[in-house]
Amino acid sequence: MIPLIKLKNKIFYNELFSNLLFVAIIASYILLKAISNLAYGASYFIAFRSGIMGAVMYVAGMYTVNLASNNSDENKQTFLIDMRIAKKGLVTSAVYFLFLFTTIIDNLQRKDILSGLPILSYLPGYDHLISIIGRLSQSISDITSFILPEQIRNIILGNLFYVLIPFILFKLLGYQFKDLFSLRYARASWPILSIYLVMFFSSGITIKKIWGFVYSLLYPALCEEFFHRGIIFRSANNIFRKVPIALLVGTIAFSLVHFPDYFFRIYNGNLLLSFSNIADLFLFGIFMAYGYQKTGTLLPWILIHALSDALYL
């Protein structure tokens, strides 16, 4: 047992902490959280404690995943992509991300949070698509008392833009998605998944809470994990040999796509609060990507993502 733990410690150090980039990521997170807290009147102790505790929590989660993972590379076979295909995929995903980013801006414009004609109105057929989905969402919502039209709309558009179109596009590029949702190598995720399940069920179960989980599962968990981890991070991990570089490249888009909503809608133009919460999101993305890299399957991380979001609904 002790030799195994020593081996796991060595693997964890070599993968992450031996690279100054990962240390810089953790240090930057702590500093950003401290600056944000200090700006709102917190003492130095409380300001830095918040950042340190957040960093420790995520690093401890990553260490737990590393400790519970198997020593075989068999699970990583589902993760592998030919280098040339991975490079094409990373470039393609960067271009496609720009489209996804415009859908966020377009949505904020349609809600009158941002001014101007919705940017994707210039795309032929897009307004008609949004109109059809809007009417369908309202019809489904009218059937129940607890499902909002916007939730149905998010599920439809999210799975269209983040799952269906990327699946077809990257399948044509040569990506394979077999065993992407398998539980065969998911052992390393069980400790984390168990913690989230206990937290979810400990406060009781209601219809609204169950729907909150189902909604979070279909959107954003499935959508974001499939595109940001299953495609972008997977591509980066097959290109860059060092894990921290792949984690950084694979998580930047995940963080950036949330920025417009955080800055313009949730925090009403407060840049410091927006960046502070994006930092939390970034570290969460790093953690999820590392878990996917250790297991080679997305399913448990989709469940963990959904449970994490459902706890705050």
Image (spheres, helix red, strand yellow):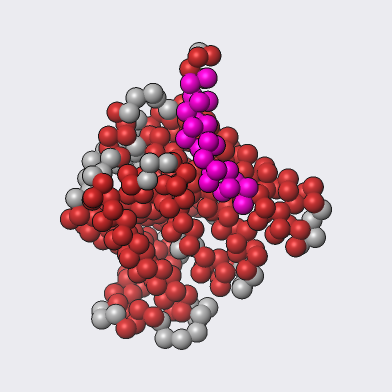
Q: Nearer the viewer, residue 178 or 90?
A: 90
Look at the image and say whether residue 90 sits in the magenta stretch.
Answer: no
Residue 107 % position (x, y): 43, 74
Q: Nearer the viewer, residue 159 or 234?
A: 234
Q: Is residue 17 above or below residue 251?
A: above
Q: Is residue 137 visible?
A: no
Look at the image and say whether residue 12 sits in the magenta stretch.
Answer: yes
Q: Is residue 96 left or right of residue 190?
A: left
Q: Residue at x 26, y 46 (%)?
A: 83
Q: Nearer the viewer, residue 142 or 241?
A: 241
Residue 121 % position (x, y): 34, 82
In the rendered structure, which segment of residues is drawn in magenta?
Answer: 6-28
Which picture quadrant has residue 180?
top left
Q: Is residue 231 above or below residue 107?
A: above
Q: Is residue 186 above or below residue 259?
A: above
Q: Residue furthest bottom?
A: 116
Q: Quadrant of the C terminus?
A: bottom right
Q: Residue at x 35, y 78 (%)?
A: 120
